[in-house]
Image (tube, rainbow, N blue to C red):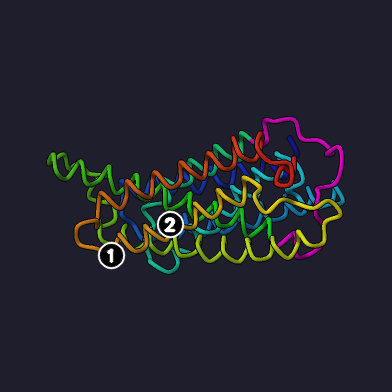
Amino acid sequence: MQPLAILTVLAYGVSLGLYFRLLYADQKIVGRAATAMLAVSLALHYFFLLERAHQLQAVPYQDLYGAVSLFAWLLALTYFGLEMVHRQRTLGAFLLPFVVLILVAGMLGRPGVPAGPPPGHGIVFALHVTLSVLAYAAFGLSFVMSLMYLAEETLLRRHRLGTIVWRFPALDLLERMTRSSVLVGMGAILAGTLLGFVAVRRLETPVSHFDPKYLVTLAIVGLYATYLYLERQTSWRGGRASRLCVFNFAVILLSVTVVNLFLTRAHRYF
C-alpha cells in the first residue's frame, strides 16, 4: 500500500473518530474539527487519485482498484457538500465508515496496470464515467440516509431514546437531505448518460442500443423519478419513501455487479 494511500485512510479515520465524538459531546469545536479533517482527507484522496492516474498514464478508474477509490472519494465529497448546505454533521459518523471500508477494500486488492485501455477515451468518455460514478455515490448517500431514517423512526416508535438518538437529525431534515442527494444523483446520471451516447459514437466497435446497461440505467432513472414524485405525497412520505430509496439502491448494486461484470462488454472497464 502506497504511503499516500495510508495517509489518506488515517485522515479519514481521524475524521471519523471526531464525528463519533460529536455524537456524545455536542461541541462546536469538535464538529468543526471533524469537518476540517474531512476536507483534509478529501484533498489527500484527490492527490492519491492523481498519483494513481500518473502511474497508469490513464484515468484512475481504468481498473477495479481505481474505480472503487473514485467511488469512495465521490461519496465523501457528496456528503461534504450536503453537510455544508444543510449544516448537519451527525451523519458523518454513519457515512464515513462506508467510505473507509470501501477505500480499504479497494486498497487491499491487487492494483496493477490494466491489460489494455478502456473501450472509450477522451474528455467526453472521462466525464461520462465520472458523472456516472458520482450518480452512484449520491444514490449511495441517499441509501445510507434512508437506512438512518428507518432506524430512527423505529427507535422513536418504540420509545428507545438514548443519548446518541437525541443527536440524530430530525426526520424531516433527513427527508430533505435524502431528496437533495437523489437530485444530485439524478442530475449526474442524466448528464452522464447523455455524454455516454456522445462517446459511444466515437467507438470503433458499435454498441447495441439494447445493451443491458442502457436498459438498467433507464430503469434506475425511472425508479428515482418515481421516488421524487412519491416522497412528496402524504401517503408515501417518511418510511415508505425511505424503503423505496433502499430498494432503488439495491437495483444499482445489481447494475454495477451482475450487469457490469457478466451481461455487458461495453461497460466493463476492468
User: Quick one: label 2 or label 1, which is nearer the N terminus?
Assistant: 2
Report the number of discs.
2
- Density class for disc 1 (Cα within 10 Å; few <14, some 14-19, many ≥20) is few
Residue underneath mark 1: 232
**Is 45 on the left-hand or right-hand side of 242?**
right
Against 243, is 227 above or below? Answer: below
Amino acid type, callout 1: Arg
Marks 2 and 1, how far apart at CA: 13 Å
Q: Position of residue 119 (x, y in %)?
A: 81, 49
* Farthest-out residue, bottom: 85
Question: Residue at point 75% right, 30% down?
Answer: 110
Asked if the magenta segment contains residue 170, the reply would be no
**Is 23 on the left-hand or right-hand side of 144?**
left
The range drawn in magenta is: 106-127
Indicate which disc residue 3 carries: none
Give the quadrant of residue 226: bottom left
Q: Position of residue 175 (x, y in %)?
A: 31, 59
Residue placed most toward the observer, 126 or 225: 225
**Is 121 on the left-hand or right-hand side of 169?**
right
- Density class for disc 2 (Cα within 10 Å; few <14, some 14-19, many ≥20) is many
Asked if the magenta segment contains residue 115, the reply would be yes
Residue placed most toward the observer, 183 or 112: 183
Question: Residue at point 61% right, 40% down?
Answer: 103
**Is 42 on the left-hand or right-hand side of 124?**
left
Residue underneath mark 2: 224
Q: Position of residue 206 (x, y in %)?
A: 79, 53
Label 2 element class: helix
